Amino acid sequence: MLKELYEFWVKYFMSTNKSALFKNLLLFSVMSILLIPSIHTGKAHGTNSNIISSADEIEHIFYLPPQSSEDNLIAGEFQEFNTFLPSATRKKWTIMTYMDGDNNLEEAAIDDIGEMERGGGSVDDVNVIVLIDRIDGYDTSNGDWTGAKIYDIETDTTNDIDSSQLVNMGELAMDHPTTLQNFIEYCFANFPADYYCLNIWDHGAGVFGACSDDTSGGGLLTINEIQSAIIGATTTYPEYIDIVSFDCCVMNVLELAYELRNSCDYLVASEDNIPFDGYDYETLISDITSNPDMIPEDFCEAIVDQYGGQYPTEESTCLSAINISKIDQIMTHLDDLATNLSYGLSNYNYKYLLYQARSASRAFSDGAFVDIVDLCEKINNLFINTKLNSVVTALIDAVEDAVFSNWQHTSYLSTAHGLSIFYPITDYQLPENVMNNYADRTAHFTGMDLQQDNQWGEFIRLCYNIYSLVAPEYPDFISLETQTQNTITENYIDTYLISIQEEEVYELSCIIESGDADIYLSTVTSSGYSIIIGSSLVNPDDGSIELCRRFLPAAVYTIIVLGVGPSSQYSFDISAYTIPALDVKDQQNTTGGSVYGEDGHFIQDLHHYYTVDLKKDIYSIILNNSATTNYLINIYSLDWELLDSLSPAGYGNGLQLLFNSTEEMTIIIEVYAFEGAGSFELVVLSSKGLGFSMVAVLLLSVTAILTISYIRSSKKQKRN
């Protein structure tokens, strides 16, 4: 009876409006004094470890929120529940789940409490505490009650909730930060532990927040409010939250991680949607209760591992753990990226290519958020700018350093790296003026720290001003064998489109009439929008013609011209390339650069092709590299089926490929420089019909070529 009377006064006291609080304060104080003797001595009602035991502890029972008009807007009138349990002993872990089932996830909430009970619930070294808020209409089990209750989870294998109900709170506004703060304080006061994991459970919306409470109007806890609730609780109590976990959709965003930089050590969340069943709490609770000495980092990894084990065949599922102490270094490199991209958009005509890079990147929540690492990789795939590429690479390294555990379904093709950021390119399902609100830290983004401490918000605003959340206009289309010329300044980008109708070998030739410029060809590939060939000679030292050549399938390609010198004049065209014929026993001598070039020079994708008519015979295809190049060989049929190949053997090393032609046929030989720059010698020799002496000559020829290659290679190594 005493406990029920006590709980009545808790709820009555906190449900009274501000003007009435002080009218009842005296009455409450008198009532408390009357109750203290019987509570302290245990007379009449015996001992009870769940109620206060001395007058000194009264000050810990209630926390009065500061005067604010906002407090009176909470649906159902906010109720305090910071009951203090003085006999609580410090355990290894307290797992506190803030479960907002006051919406269409009510059934999942009930199911997850059942999973926690089957996992074992609270034990000697672990507290498992849940605040659950329900709603009418989605689940009728367990008495179909509504409102909020706090449970100390106990082991049970039935379908009903059989845990200890600590407090029946009535209706709470789970989308209000004071509710979250007081729940954390309640756990700090009553269930102290060496380690704390705060698990926020409900719908999630990334930078817009989490926890939608239908009864109180369907609002969200903003990420700033989540931060303020945690900081408020850890200010009131000398405790610290080790892990903040979100069993909510799309909450692994950098904005949230940065908001929590002073509030926890680790963040566990998903970049994408989380299925209805959420976490496997039976496994998680069993893991932590069976190994309470587990440190927070290991528990984070356990959460990620169980998630991967739970959804091995569920597409679009991923989960990762972030080391919050690494967030500042991400912010530094993100600021550099935002600054560089903003300058490029304003001064270097990045508009079209940046849009293509962003479009090709892994996005979540209908495109509102983008994976940071995948975005960076797509930028590196399309932009050849030493400073920008360096900034992007540093950001990739920083994110990969922070994400210490990451599971992603194979359907992502390794593009979900564990941390996203707000970067929409369409207005689909976004609030009006969302880009400016984000940059200004207003509306859903009020109080957010990232935009205040980083240029990313202004970059988002600039993108909005340029794109207006619609795709930019296409560059001009050009035709095959048509000369296109222009003058370009340093770091500026000219873009053109060309439609290739027939698959064959094409040659892109760009005459640099003055200055220095590079040329590239890009298109959509299996890894996104990427540069597939290019030429970046040092003009005029390496020559005045940028030349690249390759077999191209039918597609639409983007031609990119990059200004390298202060002012450069160029003229280019792209045309089908006629593959020259090579007769058996004839020797072909050619020179060229390579993908990686040599000491910054002669960088070009120049594929060399030859057709050879073969009879039924065994042929020896011999390639002799110069001492400064490393070539490879591919053999194709006329319909471009790969028949055979030889990988590079090293600078100056010769290659010999024996090819068995079982019928008369024409093959295409492709010679391609992997690294270095210089010449090669190619010859195709036949063995059919040769006498002993001719075979000996053939063998001697092969031996001589390989010997020369070895000598050249040795000299090259000595020079190095």
Image: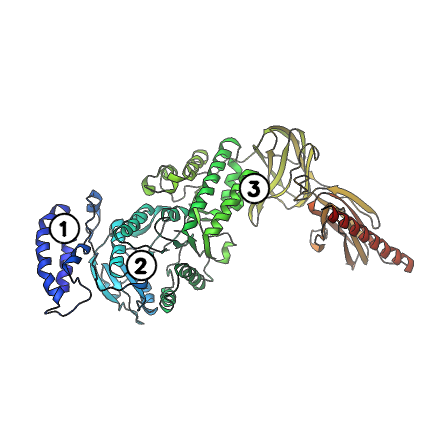
State the separation of the CA atoms marked 1 and 2: 27 Å
Circle 1 packing at 10 Å, graded few (<14), some (14-19), many (20+), is some
Foreground mark, 2 or 3?
2
Q: Answer above or below: position of 565 versus 156.
A: above
Q: Secondary structure at mark 3?
A: helix
- Residue 220 on image: x %, y %: 30, 48
Q: Which residue is mark 1?
A: 16
Which residue is painted at 51% across and 41% down in the image?
391
Which residue is painted at 37% across and 68% down in the image?
286
Which residue is painted at 38% across and 38% down in the image?
439
- Residue 678 on image: x %, y %: 74, 43
Q: Which residue is mark 2?
A: 97
Q: Is residue 52 visible?
A: yes
Where is residue 199, by image quadrant?
Answer: bottom left
- Residue 689 on image: x %, y %: 88, 58
Considering the image in quadrants, where does the N terminus appear?
bottom left
Left or right: where 336 falls relative to 714: left
Judging depth in this view, the residue of 228 and 317 nearest the camera is: 228
Q: Which residue is mark 3?
A: 382
Decide which of tag 1 and tag 2 comes sooner along the chain: 1
Circle 2 packing at 10 Å, graded few (<14), some (14-19), many (20+), is many
Three-letter amino acid code of the residue under disc 1: Thr
Left or right: where 580 falls relative to 365: right
- Residue 563 on image: x %, y %: 60, 32
